[in-house]
Amino acid sequence: MHEAGLARNVAKALKSRGLTLAQVRLSVRGGHRDPAEFEADLRAHLIQAMPDQARAVPGLDIRRAPFGHLCPGCGNEFESPQIAASCPRCHAESLPELTDEEIDIERLERYP
């Protein structure tokens, strides 16, 4: 499962940077699955990959970031966080630039 590999990579990256789940936000680009199903599976795999931080997984901020799309109807190139985004010009269903999810880890800045 793709989400298991992503969860292992997130765990490895956080460990190497000395960060915890409470200190980061995950920004997801691309994909071909329902975002809610993907997020639920990712959270389940994060619990397995990081059992010592399992309590932080439900509160982890996971956001969808815009990524490139191409409209096969009119050739319009645009960005959208949606997987099957409609072209803003002709409203046809677009082709996504990324068919697998990619995750960026963003460190949260906490201010007192």
Image (cartoon, rainbow, N blue to C red):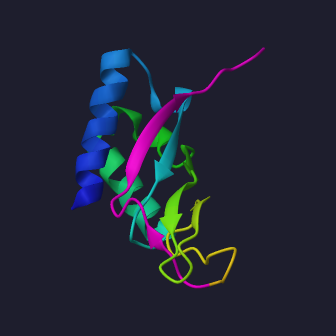
Please give the name of the residue rendered at 58% of the width and 69% of the height, measured from the top-left corner. 76
Inspect the magenta stretch and tell me whether residue 71 lies in it: no
Q: Is residue 89 above or below residue 97?
A: below
Would residue 72 be found to the left or right of residue 4 on screen? right
**Residue 66 sits above or below residue 60 on the image:** below
Please tell me which residue is depicted at 44% across the width and 58% down the height of the picture.
Answer: 30
Judge from the rendering whether residue 35 lies leftward or rightward of residue 2; answer left or right: right
In-front residue for pair 52/7 = 7
Give the position of the N terminus as an image quadrant: bottom left
Residue 28, given in percent of the width and then of the height, sits at 48, 50
Residue in the picture at 39% in, 15% down = 18
The quadrant in which residue 98 appears is: bottom left
Quarter holding the C terminus is top right
What stretch of residues is rendered in magenta? 92-112
Indicate the position of residue 38 as horizontal and vertical percent values.
41, 64
Furthest residue in direction right, as rendered: 112
Location of residue 107 with respect to 80 vertically, above or below: above
Quick one: 99 or 88, which is closer to the camera? 88
Residue 69: percent from the left, percent from the top? 50, 65
Specify the principal SS of the magenta part: loop
